[in-house]
Amino acid sequence: MGKRIEMDLTEKEKLIQECLAGRIRMREAARRAGVGHSTMHTWISRYRAEGVSALSENGNAQRRRYSEDIRQKAVDVNANLKL
């Protein structure tokens, strides 16, 4: 797997549709996208379940978002540990 390539939504959708139609294999689609085959599998699963809108979300960014309340609690716990 090479360096990750930034792809726009239409390019992702085109690769997924080619894969679903059987014109290319999932690993080939992943290679063209510059991602691992597991990422391509995730894209395909999300596309089937939610449609094209699911491809516009960055899965990793969604996992890193914490509310202000949770962030403050983490700071408070860390401060208490240093005492």
Image (cartoon, rainbow, N blue to C red):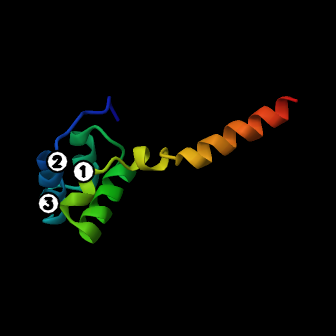
The residue positioned farthest toward the bottom in the image shown? 49
Other-residue count near label 3 (Cα within 10 Å), few / some / many at <14 / 14–19 / ≥20: some
* Real-space CA distance between mark 3 and mark 2, rounded to the nearest whole angstrom: 12 Å
Say which amino acid is labelled 2: Leu
Count of numbered marks: 3
The label nearer to you, 1 versus 3, is 1
x, y percent for residue 61: 41, 44
Q: Looking at the image, which is closer to me, 40 or 23?
A: 40
Left or right of 73, for residue 1 = left
- Residue at which label 3 appears: 17
| Residue 24: image location, x then y, percent | 16, 55
Q: Looking at the image, is 34 positioned above or below residue 63?
A: above
State the residue position of label 2.
9
Confirm or deny contact between disc 3 and disc 2 (CB under 8 A).
Answer: no
Q: Is residue 71 above or below residue 39?
A: above
Along the polypeptide, which appears first: circle 3 or circle 2? 2
**Do the residues under discs 1 and 3 have CB atoms within 8 angstroms?**
no
Secondary structure category for the residue under label 3 = helix
SS category of the residue bearing label 1: helix
Q: Contact (CB < 8 A) between labels 1 and 2? A: yes
The C terminus is located in which quarter? Answer: top right
Please give the residue where the numbered disc 1 appears in the rendered image: 56
Say left or right for 24 vs 1. left
In the image, residue 17 lies at what x, y percent? 14, 60
